[in-house]
Image (cartoon, rainbow, N blue to C red):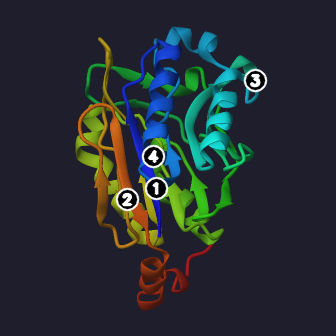
Amino acid sequence: MHLIAAAQMVSTADKAHNLEAATRLVRQAAKLGARLVGLPENFSWMGAETERASAAETLEGPTLARMAELARELRLTLLAGSILESGAPGGRLYNTSVLFGPQGERLAVYRKMHLFDVEVGDGATYQESAAVAPGTEVVSAPTELGRLGLSVCYDLRFPELYRRLSREGATLLAVPAAFTLMTGKDHWEVLLRARAIENQCYVFAPAQGGRHSDKRITYGHALVVDPWGLVTARASEGEGLALAPVDTALQQRIRRNLPCLEHRRLLD
């Protein structure tokens, strides 16, 4: 069995501070024995929407270069939850998740497909699409723990994405997120457990959790969920880690005894 760790952060507009916190959490997870570590959505920057463009970087920028070096130094697989990536059509950005292997190599790049344009009752209106362009590709990649399917935050509400990932052979699903307090308290755990159960996958969900500014509070509760839908690890308040094992024998037994993935009839 291998350990996986979902990090929980309280990122702000101070990118240097955020990167120090991310590095500290990844090092802590590695010291505890984690072989796969995930950071949350917008781990390197969570500031005012009007400042998004100035915070954006390319895939070759300093934030991801630092994460690649960290993965190489610690010899683990590292999910850089998401950053704002410059260069999308029309002057917009992408919300991009990048997976690095133990040699610091880039294993996968996923650009968030479903954008958060909603009113959730917390006094704020979210219009992610005003600055962010949607990705178009379903992305998974092999790791030493199994094939990992990538997604970001609001994607969690669209089960067809995860069905595609499980059909591609994913045994783990990553959901780095910055769920709002209003939606998170009622929907976060329910949806994560549902995605795990219906796809018989491990789900690990790094999260933003706390007050980022006067106007932004996120729910937190970074989780690891097993293929039976049981929560095997949960972060506490504020910065921390949810650390749990991946038991491939358990997953194989669940899939063998309850072969619902083989019983699917409605296939696209």
- What residue did someone put label 2 on? 244
Q: Which badge, 1 or 3, is on the more N-terminal residue? A: 1
The x, y position of residue 43, in whole percent, is 49, 29
Amino acid type of the residue tagged 4 in the rendering: Lys
Image label count: 4
Judge from the rendering whether residue 242 lies leftward or rightward of residue 49; answer left or right: left
Residue at image coords 66%, 68%: 168
* Residue 25 sits in quarter: top left
Give the numbered dot on residue 31: 4
Report the mark closest to the observer, 4 or 2. 4
Amino acid type of the residue tagged 3 in the rendering: Gly
Give the numbered dot on residue 32: none
Q: Is residue 6 above or below residue 59?
A: below
Whether tag 4 and tag 3 are in contact, CB under 8 A, the answer is no
- What residue did someone put label 3 on? 87
Q: Considering the numbered disc 2 on the image, is that residue within a helix, a strand or a loop?
A: strand
Amino acid type of the residue tagged 1 in the rendering: Ile
Q: Distance between the residues labelled 4 and 3?
A: 36 Å
Q: Which badge, 4 or 2, is on the more N-terminal residue? A: 4
Q: How far apart are marks 1 and 4 (CA)?
A: 12 Å
Residue at image coords 41%, 41%: 7
The residue carrying pointer 3 sits among few (fewer than 14), some (14 to 19) or many (20 or more) residues within 10 Å by Cα, namely some
Q: Considering the numbered disc 3 on the image, is that residue within a helix, a strand or a loop?
A: loop
The x, y position of residue 139, in whole percent, is 67, 53
Q: Distance between the residues labelled 2 and 3?
A: 36 Å
Q: Distance between the residues labelled 1 and 2?
A: 6 Å
Q: Is residue 77 above or below residue 128?
A: below
Whether tag 2 and tag 3 are in contact, CB under 8 A, the answer is no
- What residue did someone put label 1 on? 4
* Residue 70 sits in quarter: top right
